[in-house]
Image (cartoon, coloured by chain):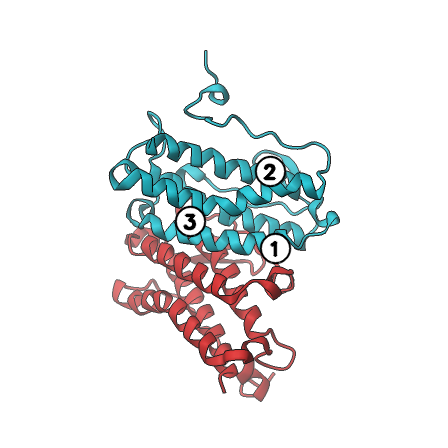
Chain colours: A cyan, B red
């Protein structure tokens, strides 16, 4: 029987694999690149999909393509905020949010996806400019997530969000195929 | 401090915020919604008008025009999230951030202003798209700000955040002369 993590529709690229020991700059480089490339890959996937399939769920009971794109903008806004909090406070407790409820707010059905694609493009530019200037000590700074009760380093969070972008890109590619 | 002192005029070029106590009608909200929608284009025009002076502080000891623009992007990302939290949780406690420390992070000195201006344009489009769909009951939903120990209704937050944009637009105007 499939668990959520082994269901290829839910987890088309598998679950995230977070590093448990510090990465080298060379070890971080591919994740930085994935984060930088994500907005253009999302735009290309949305273009291949076209308007009608954007309104379809990527799996039975799952989000529509439109919800996935607006979710990515909201999620990465929060991730960017968490990086800045961790760089300006000591092991801050960050603010979780109800991602399922956010994806049902009325702007998600009404806002053009180009708005969130452009938001992601500029947000990732700003975020990557920040990340490229972090020193080794800053990559080991942490924040605490009260929902998961986990403390994460910034480089673990980099790996998580590089995965998060590719995870949802794979959902869009199920609709674009 | 004397409210009309020269320093106060530089700090508060459009004056201090007057927050409404009674609920606003749709007609009373309309000019604030319009100001929020117009802000990104007005900021882009102010940056163009300031030219190289955008790298100067708008008052002795104040932020540079560059810091003001990146601060607006960072702050409005947080404010947008506060609206979504208040619409999906009951009187949520929002997460303050250290705006002075955020404005000293290294991306602020190196990210092109066009990135944060475009980010603000997309974010305000998404935010305005959300606000257009709120009903009267949703405008009366609240959040709690722990640093100021205040509970704000969303219609009050609209007035406060519109003021915030025009306040900093006023600072950029000081750099044009």
Evaluate whether residue B20 shows in this view. no
Q: Nearer the viewer, residue A36 or A58?
A: A36
How far across and how far down the image is residue B142, in percent? 42, 53
Residue at mark 1 shares a chain with residue at mark 2: yes
Residue at mark 2 shares a chain with residue at mark 3: no
The reply to whether callout 1 and callout 2 are in contact (CB within 8 Å) is: no
How far across and how far down the image is residue A137, in percent? 75, 48
Q: Residue at x 70, y 38 (%)?
A: A23
Q: In which quarter of the image is the N terminus of chain B?
A: bottom right
Which element type, helix, strand or loop, lies under badge 2?
helix
For disc 3, the marked residue is: B84
Which corner quadrant of the image does residue A152 belong to?
top right
Q: Residue at x 28, y 64 (%)?
A: B25
User: Residues under labels 1 and 3: Cα distance?
Assistant: 26 Å
User: Residues under labels 1 and 2: Cα distance?
Assistant: 16 Å
User: Residues under labels 2 and 3: Cα distance?
Assistant: 26 Å
Q: Residue A130 carries which label?
A: 1
How far across and how far down the image is residue B141, in percent? 38, 52
């Amino acid at each position: 029987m499939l668990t959520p993590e082994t269901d290829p529709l839910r987890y088309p690229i598998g679950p995230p694999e977070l590093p448990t020991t510090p990465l080298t700059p060379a070890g971080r480089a591919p994740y930085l690149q994935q984060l930088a490339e994500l907005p253009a890959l999302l735009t290309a996937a949305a273009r291949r999909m076209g308007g009608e399939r954007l309104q379809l769920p990527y799996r039975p009971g799952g989000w529509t393509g439109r919800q996935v794109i607006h979710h990515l903008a909201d999620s990465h806004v929060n991730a960017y905020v968490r990086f800045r909090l961790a760089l300006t406070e000591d092991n801050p407790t960050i603010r979780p949010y109800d991602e399922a409820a956010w994806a049902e707010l009325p702007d998600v059905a009404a806002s053009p996806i180009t708005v969130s694609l452009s938001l992601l493009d500029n947000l990732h530019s700003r975020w990557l400019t920040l990340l490229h200037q972090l020193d080794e000590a800053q990559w080991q700074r942490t924040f605490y997530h009260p929902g998961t009760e986990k403390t994460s380093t910034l480089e673990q969070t980099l790996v998580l969000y590089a995965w998060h972008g590719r995870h949802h890109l794979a959902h869009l590619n199920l609709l674009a195929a | 401090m004397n409210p009309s002192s020269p320093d106060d005029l530089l700090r508060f070029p459009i004056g201090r915020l007057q927050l409404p106590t009674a609920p606003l009608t749709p007609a009373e909200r309309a000019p604030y919604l319009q100001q929020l929608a117009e802000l990104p284009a007005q900021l882009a025009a102010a940056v163009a008008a300031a030219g190289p002076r955008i790298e100067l502080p708008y008052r002795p000891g104040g932020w540079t025009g560059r810091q003001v623009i990146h601060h607006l992007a960072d702050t409005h990302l947080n404010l947008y999230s506060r609206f979504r939290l208040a619409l999906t949780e009951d009187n949520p406690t929002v997460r303050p951030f250290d705006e002075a420390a955020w404005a000293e992070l290294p991306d602020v000195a190196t990210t092109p202003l066009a990135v944060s201006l475009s980010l603000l344009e997309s974010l305000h489009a998404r935010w305005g798209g959300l606000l257009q769909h709120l009903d009267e009951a949703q405008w009366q939903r609240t959040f709690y700000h722990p640093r100021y120990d205040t509970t704000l209704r969303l219609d009050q937050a609209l007035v406060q955040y519109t003021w915030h944009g025009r306040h900093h637009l006023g600072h950029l105007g000081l750099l044009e002369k």
